Image (cartoon, rainbow, N blue to C red):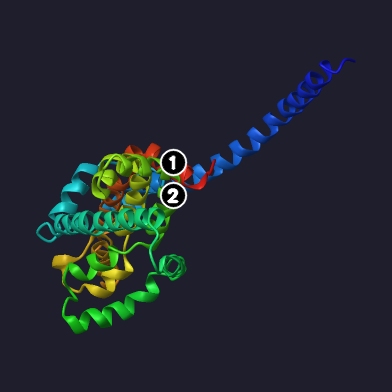
């Protein structure tokens, strides 16, 4: 055996071993992935099927079986007509909280994370420690202190009681810090400064396009967190005029089961409203999925 052929034979042996192991690993991963997919899809399938039933079919048929009539359109109309269209008001309120709250949280996370990654200033280590500590604190633990503080300044039961807490996202700040450190080379910024570019011009024309995947990722997390926010508006809001979809649907549920013996059944409205509530999130995930995946991987892999 010559010196030149030995490496080739070892490479073939290693390749053969990998080929032999690949199918077994692929089968295991496929089975595990399939189980997770089934686990995630079963509630959605039940929700979709139940939304097509009338109230009588809902209580008389199996959960994963269709009813005698297809009532999805009628259920949607009934949901939006319930109590003079209060569901539509809740939907608009949720959009308001997402646009202002999640949008503002994304903007602050991008500016703060980029500044922390690309600028040296006194107290930088303290800011990093504060952000890391804030990630470990659950948001529900701060809701009651925030309620007491907002009560003193008179903004409880207003949209600001929900929007202001949503503007702060420590995880989004941390994610943009990590992503900015890897996605924007320091050499590129130095070259722009040498050419006479201002810091604002450099950020908007050079850095911002490179931060696109990270921005989309942070925005998606903020949108989902704000859209699904339940405990904060439950504590802060009592007027139905400013409630989001989460607490609004809970009010319908409480009204349904408060009547003795279920005298006022509204399950078809609750289920159809829940379906309408998750549709915007599904659309957002489908359109932003590739940016979301690339944003997560780019911020965690260092060359």
Q: Earlier in the sequence, mark 2 or mark 1?
A: 2
Look at the numbered disc 1 and give the secondary structure of its residue. Answer: helix
Residue drawn at (21%, 48%) of the image: 75
Q: Is residue 77 visible?
A: yes
| Mark in front: 2 vs 1 | 2
Q: Nearer the viewer, residue 279 or 85?
A: 279
Residue 252 picture quarter: bottom left
Quadrant position of the N terminus in the picture:
top right
In the displayed structure, does residue 12 sit left or right of residue 153? right
Q: How many marks?
A: 2
Q: Position of residue 206 (x, y in %)?
A: 31, 40
Residue drawn at (64%, 34%) of the image: 27
In the displayed structure, does residue 22 sit left or right of residue 260? right
Image height check: is 262 above or below 68? below
| Pointer 1 local density, CA inside 10 Å: few below 14, some 14–19, many at least 20 | some
Look at the numbered disc 2 and give the secondary structure of its residue. Answer: helix
Image height check: is 19 above or below 238? above
Q: Position of residue 126 (x, y in %)?
A: 43, 70
What residue is pinned by disc 1? 293
Q: Nearer the viewer, residue 232 or 109?
A: 109
In the displayed structure, does residue 252 sit left or right of residue 63? left
Q: Is residue 62 visible?
A: no
- Label 2 – label 1 distance at C-alpha: 18 Å
Q: Nearer the viewer, residue 58 or 208?
A: 208
| Pointer 2 local density, CA inside 10 Å: few below 14, some 14–19, many at least 20 | some
Give me the disc on residue 41.
none
Give me the disc on residue 181.
2
Residue drawn at (25%, 47%) of the image: 198
In the displayed structure, does residue 190 sit left or right of residue 243? right
Q: Position of residue 260 (x, y in %)?
A: 28, 73
């Amino acid at each position: 055996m010559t010196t030149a052929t030995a490496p080739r034979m070892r490479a073939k042996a290693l390749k053969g071993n990998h080929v032999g192991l690949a199918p077994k690993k692929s089968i295991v991963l496929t089975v595990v992935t399939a189980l997770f997919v089934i686990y995630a899809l079963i509630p959605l399938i039940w929700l979709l099927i139940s939304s097509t039933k009338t109230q009588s079919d809902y209580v008389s048929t199996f959960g994963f079986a269709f009813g005698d009539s297809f009532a999805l359109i009628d259920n949607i109309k009934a949901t939006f007509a319930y109590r003079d269209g209060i569901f539509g008001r809740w939907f608009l309120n949720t959009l308001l909280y997402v646009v202002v709250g999640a949008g503002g949280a994304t903007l602050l996370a991008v500016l703060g994370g980029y500044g922390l990654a690309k600028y040296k200033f006194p107290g930088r280590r303290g800011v990093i420690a504060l952000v890391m500590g804030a990630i470990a604190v659950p948001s529900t633990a701060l809701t009651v202190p925030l309620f007491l503080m907002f009560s003193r300044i008179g903004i409880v039961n207003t949209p600001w009681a929900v929007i202001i807490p949503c503007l702060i996202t420590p995880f989004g700040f941390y994610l943009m810090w990590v992503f900015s450190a890897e996605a924007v080379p320091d050499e590129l910024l130095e070259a722009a400064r040498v050419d006479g570019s201002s810091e604002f011009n450099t950020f908007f024309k050079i850095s911002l396009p490179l931060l696109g995947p990270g921005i989309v990722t942070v925005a998606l997390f903020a949108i989902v967190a704000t859209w699904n926010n339940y405990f904060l508006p439950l504590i802060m809001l009592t007027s139905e005029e400013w409630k989001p979809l989460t607490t609004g649907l809970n009010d319908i549920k409480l009204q349904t089961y408060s009547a003795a013996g279920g005298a006022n059944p509204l399950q078809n409205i609750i289920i159809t409203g829940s379906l309408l509530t998750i549709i915007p999130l599904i659309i957002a995930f489908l359109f932003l999925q590739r940016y979301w995946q690339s944003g997560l991987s780019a911020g965690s892999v260092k060359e």
